[in-house]
Image (spheres, rainbow, N blue to C red):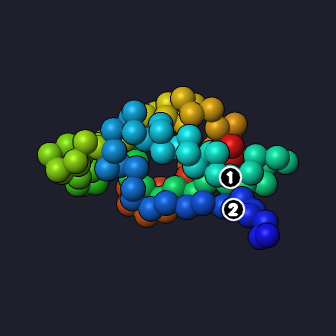
Amino acid sequence: MMRREKPICLSTSFILHGWGDEKCIKILKRYKEAIPSKDNVGKLIIIDMVVKVSKEENELLETQLLFDMLMMSLVTGRERSEKDWAKLFLDTSYTDYKTTPIFGFTFVSKFIP
């Protein structure tokens, strides 16, 4: 009989923005169940857009809003601000998270169950 281990790290890239908040919460809870939480070993890494509203980044804001309209018209999802992402992760009871910008409006987020 083979012993099935839980993965130490799960990652997803540009998936959650295609879903509404309720579905994202369900998906994030399933990820949390799949990751070991003992001794903070397991992690979830998400690469996705984070909408930032600032006067310095008007060029990116137009692109972000275009992606947001695209998500709303094609699927039930939307682009989220950092505050929206934080609410999703708090609603799914992750113990800690850190969001780091990569380039443009793309961010990498690390979550610990």
Q: Residue at x 49, y 60 (%)?
A: 12
104, 41: nearer the viewer: 41
Relative image position of residue 47 (x, y in whole percent): 48, 59
Residues at badges 2 and 1 in contact (C-beta under 8 Å)? yes
Q: Residue at x 34, y 45 (%)?
A: 19
Tag count in the figure?
2
Of pointers 2 and 1, the one earlier in the residue sequence = 2
Q: Which residue is mark 1?
A: 35
Secondary structure under tag 1 reads loop
Q: Tell me the kind of residue under disc 2.
A: Pro
Location of the N terminus by quadrant is bottom right
Q: Tell me the kind of residue under disc 1.
A: Ile
Q: Is residue 51 above or below residue 13?
A: above
10 Å neighbourhood of mark 1: few (<14), some, or many (≥20)? many
Cα–Cα span, label 2 and label 1: 6 Å
Q: Residue at x 78, y 54 (%)?
A: 41
Relative image position of residue 15 (x, y in whole percent): 39, 56
Secondary structure under tag 2 reads loop
Relative image position of residue 2 (x, y in whole percent): 77, 70
Would you identify the image quadrant in which residue 5 lies? bottom right
Question: In screen coordinates, is 43 left or right of 1?
Answer: left
Can you tell which mark lies on residue 98? none
Residue pushed farthest right?
Answer: 39
For the question of whether residue 54 can be seen, the reply is no
Relative image position of residue 13 (x, y in whole percent): 44, 62
Would you identify the image quadrant in which residue 3 lies? bottom right
Q: Which residue is mark 2?
A: 7
10 Å neighbourhood of mark 2: few (<14), some, or many (≥20)? few
Question: In screen coordinates, is 81 left or right of 98?
Answer: left
